[in-house]
Amino acid sequence: MEQRMNLAAVQPAAYEALRGLEKYLHTTQLSEIEKGLIKVRASQINHCAYCINLHTVDAVRDGENAQRLFLLDAWKETNLFSEEEKIMLQLTEEITLIHQHGVAADTYNKALTILGETKLAQVLMAVIAINAWNRLAITAEMGFSVKL
């Protein structure tokens, strides 16, 4: 698969605007582990091989446990995630799949109770950012290949 477009070269202002959102996320209360879980889970849902690879490597580097990453797709069936992480993952799924049912009032209200308004807003922006990156990587066919 050959990359279709390099957005940074074709539209540098647009690319930098998206990078600006990433820079903002580094100023939030979200830990690197929390951001990693959001990035990997949304990328799994979106089937973005480039981003799954990038963000799982980053997550391990940032101290994430490999077993949690292996089970991330089935997070609801494990006890490996905290209540706060679980509501972040639920939000990630509902926002990423927003066309299906939107974000449920129960999910939103639970997130507001557990996270508070500020951190909830930060999670929303993190989910929005990775979904934008996924769509860019998939559309530009950035792909990921490895030789075994």
Image (cartoon, helix red, strand yellow):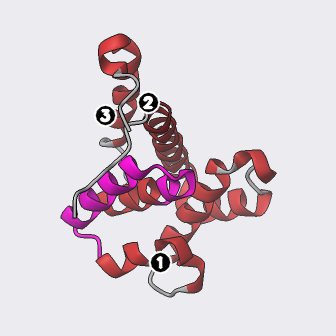
Name the element at disc 1: loop
Outermost bottom residue: 79
Tag 1 and tag 3, C-beta contact below 8 Å: no
Three-letter amino acid code of the residue under disc 2: Ala
Outermost left residue: 61
Q: Is residue 128 part of the magenta span, yes or no?
A: no
Tag 2 and tag 3, C-beta contact below 8 Å: no
Marker disc for residue 34:
none
Three-letter amino acid code of the residue under disc 1: Ser
| Disc 1/disc 2 C-alpha distance (Å) | 35 Å
Q: Position of residue 19 (x, y in %)?
A: 34, 29
**Position of 70 compared to 23: left or right?**
right
Which residue carries the number 1 mark?
82
Q: Earlier in the sequence, mark 1 or mark 3?
A: 3
| The residue stretch that appears in magenta | 41-65
Marker disc for residue 140:
2
